[in-house]
Image (cartoon, rainbow, N blue to C red):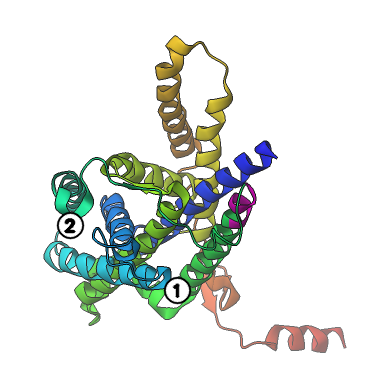
Amino acid sequence: MEILVFLSGLIALGGIYAMLAVALNVNGGLLGLWDLGVVGYFAVGAYSYTLLTIDAPEGLGLPMFAGVIGSVIITGLLSLFIGYTSLRLQNEYLLITTFAFAEIIRILAVNEEWLTNGNIGFFGLDKPFQNLIPGANYMLFFSGLVLISLAVFYFFAQRLADSPMGRYMRAIRENEIVTQSIGKKIFATKLKVFVLSSSMVGLVGCFYVWYMSIIAPNMFTSAITFTVWTALVLGGIGNNRGAVIGAFVLILVQEATRFIPVPAEYSVVLAGLRQFISGMMLVLVLRFLPQGLIAEKFKSVEKLFKFHDNSLILEPKGVGKNAASQGAE
């Protein structure tokens, strides 16, 4: 039973990181924004949910569903401000700005003790349906809840990627100047997608609170951002399925090192070994599979056009088959 509970916890943690990777893929993969503020939106969503749902005087004591909705709204509004002031920056400048935002959020969580309880944070937080499913069975239920939510995230992100909006986002990623030259509103689109992706990350923050049962500033370091980006690069940037697979593979490899038997004095070395293995995986994938484990695929124009002798021939649907049947006669 203990092994089953551990595996359920591993699946839940992998699912949480997979949702983060899918949310990051919406703006980092499809739109091509260099965003290192993932852990900042993650922390805002988690703290917003906690402060809305815990009892007074620390919080407002609202129901869990109200806390979830509130965390999404608060994260979205904050990301709207961040995006409006920074999305006109390009590449590494946007990267530095979003990274600084994430650090500011963490520092505020440490220093504003009246609001976040400082480094102590909050512990013993309630989980959904915990009273109905007590004991070790709860982790089995929670892992299923995470997987269902991950499926919803994946379905939504995939529909977005396949929609005209998704093709518009890829066009901005590939050549922003050309896309703008045909009259498209680049900044407005970037802002919408940025807020959408950040709100999705804020929603995942609620699952993280449920998983950990505690919340403290040291839970939201830049390591989370780099882990999510590593998972996305491993799986394949721009591919939602790759984002999910990359997250589960990375978490599985990192957690597998816990079972390596070493003396107590080498425990610190073992902790560093996880980061070393993750880095080696990233280097190997970038060397031999630059597009990730599952490369992004575009719909081929060969379904619409046929190329013969370097010339383009348009054939209406069914013409080729009719010509072949007439020749046989």
Residue at image position (14%, 50%) is 112
Which disc is residue 160 wearing?
A: 1
Was residue 138 drawn as part of the magenta stretch in this picture? yes
Where disc 2 sits, the SS reads loop
Can residue 293 be seen from the camera position used here? Answer: no
Rendered-image quadrant of the C terminus: bottom right
Residue at the farthest right position? 329
Residue 164 x/y as whole percent? 42, 80
Can residue 22 be seen from the camera position used here? Answer: yes
Residue 298 x/y as whole percent? 50, 65
Residue 210 x/y as whole percent? 45, 54
Mark 1 vs 2: CB contact within 8 A:
no
Q: What range of the chain is rendered magenta?
A: 136-141
State the image quarter where residue 177 is shown. Answer: bottom left
Structural crowding at the residue carrying mark 1, measured as other residues with C-alpha within 10 Å and reported as few (<14), some (14–19) or many (≥20): some
Please identify the dominant SS of the magenta region: helix
Residue nearest the observer in this picture, 134 or 297: 134
- Amino acid tagged 2: Gln
Residue at image position (37%, 57%) is 205
Which disc is residue 90 wearing?
A: 2
Rendered-image quadrant of the N terminus: top right
Residue 84 x/y as whole percent? 15, 69
For marks 1 and 2, the one nearer the N-term is 2
Where disc 1 sits, the SS reads helix
Residue 51 shown left or right of residue 267 in the figure = left
Q: Nearer the viewer, mark 1 or mark 2?
A: 1
CA gap, disc 1 and disc 2: 24 Å
In the displayed structure, 283 sits above or below 121; it is above
In the displayed structure, 73 sits above or below 255; it is below
- Amino acid tagged 1: Leu
Structural crowding at the residue carrying mark 2, measured as other residues with C-alpha within 10 Å and reported as few (<14), some (14–19) or many (≥20): few
